Each structure stands twice: as C-alpha cells, then as structure tokens.
Image (cartoon, helix red, strand yellow):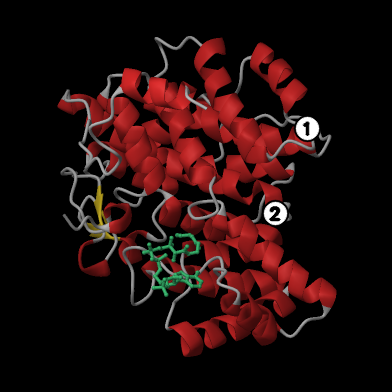
Amino acid sequence: MELPKGLAGVVVDQTKVSSTKNAILTYAGYPIKELKNAPFEEVVFLLWHTRLPNADELKDFRKLLVSQMALPYETVQLMARIAREPQHPMSILRTTVSLLGTTNDVERDDPPRILAKMLTAIAAIIRIRNDKPIKHARKNWGVVENFIYLFSGKRPTAEQVSMFNTVMVLHADHEFNASTFTARVVASTKSDYYSCLTAAVCALKGPLHGGANEQVFKMLETIRETGQDPVQYVERRIASGQKIMGFGHRVYKDGDPRAAILREIARKIAHETGNDPYFVLQERIRDYMFKKTHLHPNVDYYTALIYHCFNLDRQTFTTMFAACRTAGWLAHIIEQQAEGCPIRPSSEYVGQTNRHYLADKEENSID
Ligand SMILES: CC(C)(COP(=O)(O)OP(=O)(O)OC[C@H]1O[C@@H](n2cnc3c(N)ncnc32)[C@H](O)[C@@H]1OP(=O)(O)O)[C@@H](O)C(=O)NCCC(=O)NCCS
C-alpha cells in the first residue's frame, strides 16, 4: 500500500473555519486578501462564529477581550520563576499554557478569556526575559495595540498597529496544519482548552512549522555577521542536503499568498527602522532560491524581519506566531469538540511477525 508521506493531501475531516483550496487561503469563505486590513478582533469573531460581527457585536467583543488581558498575580509569580534564560521562550510558553490551565478558574474560562490570557502571557514572557516590569492593558485601546504595548512597553503608532494587525490576521488560521491538527486530536477526546493549546504549542515549536521564523533570522544574522556571500551560503547548505528555512510549503507550491502581503510590510518597516540591508539580503536569497529550486518564500520568511523591526529577539519569534494562531486553534477546538468522535486513525504494521516469546528467550539464553 502506497501511503502519502506526512498525510500530504489526505482529507481527514471537514471544517467550516478556513480553507486552502486551489491555493487560496479563505477564512469562513472570505479570501485572506480581503481580510488583511480587517481588525484582528473581527477576524477572530469570524473564525469562531463563521460570520462577521455587526458593529455592536464587534465593539462588545473587543471590550470583552481587552477586559480579560490580565493575569492572576500567582500566575505571574510562577512565570517569573521559569521565564528566564537559558530556557527557550517556546518551552516557557508550553509550561505557561499548562500553568494557565491550573491557576485560573478553568471552568469559567471560555475562548475570549483564554485568547486574552494567552496574548497577555506571551507578552509577559518577553517582559520577564528582558527584566522589564509587566505592563497593564488599557481599556480604550484595541487588542493589537494593547498586545504590542504589553510586550514592548511603548504605545505603538497607528501605522505599527496596522502592520502588526495584518501580521496577526494572516497568521490567525490555516486549516489543518500540524499544530491545529494536534489541537483537534486532543479536543476530539473531549479534553479541556488548555490541554489542547499546550499540545498545539508543542507542535508549533518545531523548526519545520512555527519554529522556522527564528531559523530564518538566524540565517540572516549569520550571513551578515560573517560577511559571507548569501548565494554561496545557501548553495553550500543545499549541497549538503540542508533545507533553507522560510522556503517551501506543503500546500502552496506556487507561492504562499501570505508571504506576498508580508513582503511589502517587511520592505516598508525595514526601511523605516534602518533595516534595509536585511531586506536586500532576503531579496537576494529569494531570487537565488527560485532560480535554483523553484521554491517560494512562505509565511515565516518575511515575518522574521518584521518581528526584528519590532525589536523582538529572534528566540521569541515563534511565540508571536503562537499569539496569532491561538485564535485559529480555539476555532478548531470549538468545532472539533462539537463533533464528539475521537480521532483515532489506523496504521499499517510493517514490523516483524510470527515471533514467539518463550522460544526467542530460550534461544537468546544459549551461548
Ligand atoms: C514546509 C515543508 C516542511 C514542506 O514540506 P513538504 O511538502 O513535505 O515538501 P518536502 O519537504 O518533501 O520537499 C520537497 C522537495 O523540496 C525540497 N525542499 C523543500 N523545502 C525546502 C527548503 N526549504 N530548502 C531546500 N529544499 C527544500 C526537499 O528537500 C525535497 O527535495 P527532494 O524531493 O529532492 O527530496 C518544507 O518545504 C520545509 O521543510 N521548509 C523549510 C521549513 C519551513 O520554512 N517551514 C515553515 C512552513 S510554513
């Protein structure tokens, strides 16, 4: 039996949350290109309810989310004990999500409260790592403005909010990617939200999934610090059988639609923050990769530079991905829990057969 590697192309279930059919990413039927400037809160509502909110619903939803952007005192105390170097921020996040599920009133926690707490916790991890005091959300600001403020300590400009809003919207969901599928498997057993999210964070952490954005920037830094020629660097890596992070995609073989939008944001913010050399470097690598492999940049390629321009240290990049993707994870957990059937596929056994314990033990004991 020929099995598709990594379940590529296998339809494992139905969803109304999002689709990548014909390589067009849609959220509840709306193309991502049309949603890129929609407020993040509106997109979250759309993913959770598969319809757009009316003006009053959006206002109330934003108010609810912002009102919950705070953490219990004991959670912050416990986080302060783990959120320090040399632990990787994604490991800290994994433990923190689990912690949130034990130090909160878990029975009361619903998706809006959980999303708000995840964003606040991710910002807190960054503040604690940088030895900076925790900031408190402002009730008259939106979710994105507050989130940037909570991790950076500075009120962002309207333009920064708009750019980051697009980043959050583009990362919010992506049908059955590895971390979402992981969350759905856990949700299918009727486990609680925090257990599903902890599992999703574990899957996102890997460099073949969300961890790629950190590796992209590591590559750019290495090339700049060592003064290597980018083409030679990439050539050498490919020749030795290594992958170039931020390129290729399981679904998008002719280009990731999110990367095209993010490229323009990266170009703009790099220019405004004096980081043009990184963007120029990325363009050289992109051109070479296309010529050599026909692979296109994916969502992680340009976000790496965008996060750098927001003064984030590269180890924290994947926690940003988690912050945005929590919206989608929750949408899929809600959908999966409503189904009531555990995900339990089958496998083809390819190991040895017809072995006999006592006979083999006896044979092994004879010298
Ligand atoms: C995303 C990814 C896992 C998709 O994988 P996939 O659909 O299973 O495709 P494969 O890994 O089988 O790749 C197909 C071929 O392209 C090559 N390839 C894929 N991505 C590559 C990359 N980033 N750099 C170099 N070669 C790559 C593979 O080596 C393989 O070559 P082969 O057929 O000679 O063995 C893969 O492209 C990758 O590892 N990219 C780098 C990590 C990354 O950026 N992840 C973020 C994803 S959003």
Residue at 69 percent of width and 34 percent of height? 125
Dividing the picture into quadrants, the one containing residue 138 is: top right
State the CA–CA distance, disc 2 to disc 1: 15 Å
Instruction: Identify the residue under disc 1.
Output: 84
Front in this rendered view, residue 361 or 284: 361
Q: Is residue 158 left or right of residue 151?
A: left
Label 1: few (<14), some (14–19) or many (≥20) C-alpha neighbours in 10 Å: some
Residue 161, horizontal then vertical, whole percent: 57, 54
Q: Is residue 107 left or right of residue 151?
A: left
Is the residue under label 1 in contact with that under label 2 (CB below 8 Å)? no
Q: Is residue 189 left or right of residue 76?
A: left
Residue at 61 percent of width and 39 percent of height? 90
Dot 2 or dot 1, earlier in sequence: 1
The kind of residue tagged 1 is Arg
Instruction: Identify the residue under disc 2.
Output: 314
Residue 183, horizontal then vertical, whole percent: 36, 34
Q: Is residue 73 left or right of residue 354?
A: right
The kind of residue tagged 2 is Arg
The furthest residue to the bottom: 291
Dividing the picture into quadrants, the one containing residue 212 is: bottom right
The furthest residue to the front: 367
Front in this rendered view, residue 229 or 60: 229
Work out whether residue 348 can be spotted. Answer: yes
Asked if residue 169 is positioned above or below residue 89 in the image, the reply reads below
Front in this rendered view, residue 73 or 66: 73
